[in-house]
Amino acid sequence: MKLIPAEVKSWDGTKMRIAIPGYTDGADQFPEAEICYPLADRPADTGYKILSGDPIWIMFNGGDENSPIVMGFRGKNTGGNKDTRFLEHTNFATKAENEMTETSQTHTINASSVFTVTSGSIVLNANVEINGKLKTSGDITSAGSITDADGDGGA
């Protein structure tokens, strides 16, 4: 079986319709295609952001031209950023059964509304700088001194 270039015509999160150059030229209705999901992504748990016009690769199941299977996206071959892996979707959820580790030189999180962390405790092994108001509904305890900007402890 060979890969055949195609294009997404519509995707509603369940059904995908595709255009296949040389097969569907001038068609009013486009064939429905099944998606071949990567083994790490369970279809029931994974949503994909697929847009009309996205270039894709397809194959025909058993050579049957009435049974297209989407194998993956086609590269645009220009302007790709080889240094950044970009993921875009409406929402993301990650779950690790034991531990999740992220390592980078700089880690930036931009949340336009609220950034919420829920945990039994948080340990920060670093100097902390807060550029904004600090509000607490509990006690603040320090093993060292607390100093204000002019160094007099708020006096």
Image: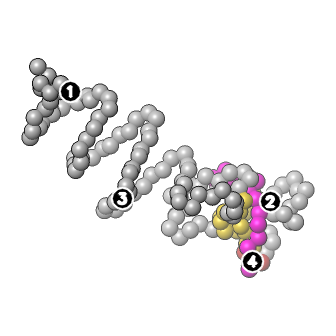
Q: Position of residue 77 (x, y in %)?
A: 69, 62
Residue 101 appears in which quarter of the rendering? bottom left
Tell me the element at label 4. Answer: loop
Q: Residues within 10 Å of mark 4 (few under 14, many from 20)?
A: few
Question: Which residue position is annotated with label 2?
Answer: 19
Query: Magenta region, mostly helix, strand or loop?
Result: strand
Q: Residues within 10 Å of mark 2 (few under 14, many from 20)?
A: many
- Can see residue 97? yes
Give the residues drawn in magenta, as a range.
1-13
Whether 143 is drawn above or below 1: the answer is above
Q: Residue at x 12, y 24 (%)?
A: 152
Q: CA distance from mark 3 to mark 4?
A: 39 Å
**Amino acid on which the number 2 mark rests in the picture:** Ala
Tell me the element at label 1. Answer: loop
Question: Which residue position is annotated with label 3?
Answer: 103
Label number found at residue 149: 1
Question: Which residue position is annotated with label 4?
Answer: 2
Label number found at residue 61: none
Cβ atoms under marks 4 and 2 closer than 8 Å: no
**Amino acid on which the number 1 mark rests in the picture:** Ala
Q: CA distance from mark 3 to mark 2?
A: 42 Å
